[in-house]
Image (cartoon, coloured by chain):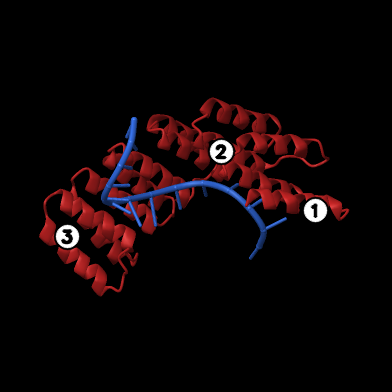
Chain colours: A red, B blue
Amino acid sequence: KVKDAKCVFDEISKWGLRPTVVSFNTLLNGYCKSGDLEEGFRLKRALEGTRLVPDVFTYSVLINGLCKESRFDDANQLFDEMCRKGLVPNDVTFTTLINGYCKMGQIDLAMEIYQQMLIKGVKPDLITFNTLINGLCKCGNLGEARELISEMTRKGLKADKITYTTLIDGCCKEGDLDVALKIRKRMTEEGVELDNVAFTALISGLCREGRVIDAETLLREMLKAGIKPD
RNA sequence: CCUAGUGGUUCCGC
């Protein structure tokens, strides 16, 4: 309902009030999410026409929009622009770019951004790692993916349900069901509950390998655990 | 703790 959001945004001025940079960013994100990047950039220009200044949120939202359209040159240009303006890209900004490259299958570029991030002293968080691990899994580089799990652990971050499910799915897609099942065990040991997403990844992986009986056993375990199949 | 970034199955299309 971006159109309605815009109306409310316009109400702000009609009431004699002024939108803040947060108001701008929120609407801008709405435009980007609805695929209207042009309107997003128009709003950025409007923002620059006030006495407000775009912040890290403004740039991260736009960079994300550009990445989702695979416009990496533009995304990098915006990244440079924010740096020139003295803004410091944070973990979200970097993760956004990393995700963009991962989704394009450009894992090498994604890893380069990750290195840049470390060099600049920006700390990767759980989402950064999950993003990279997903990228690595999707291109079949399970070894490096598991290496990143060690790395995040060294950095004091704990792998969560998404981390493990991503890895389980990667193993399943590579036909490495036994490793996938070991990860499941490890998850359980660490107190991370499997949900229907994780179970479905395993069940489908077992089916693809012809292990239908194991798949059914797992489905029953899932039901017994009170997890609703969708 | 006003706003931004990450995961699965099936089917279909390319």
Q: Residues within 10 Å of mark 3 (few under 14, many from 20)?
A: many
Q: Is residue A218 above or below residue A87?
A: below
Disc 2 marks a residue whose amino acid type is Gly
Left or right of A205, for residue A127: right
Q: Which residue is mark 2?
A: A65
Residue A225, given in percent of the width and then of the height, sits at 27, 73
Q: Which residue is mark 1?
A: A11
Q: What x and y, as percent, mark residue A115?
A: 46, 34
Find the distance from the CA under tag 3 to the CA under tag 1. Answer: 56 Å
Marker count (numbered): 3
Picture coordinates of residue A85 (x, y %)?
71, 32
Residue at label 3?
A215
In the image, what residue type sits under mark 1? Glu
Identify whether A136 is placed above or below A154.
above
| Secondary element at image label 3 | helix
Residue at 64% x, 49% y is A2
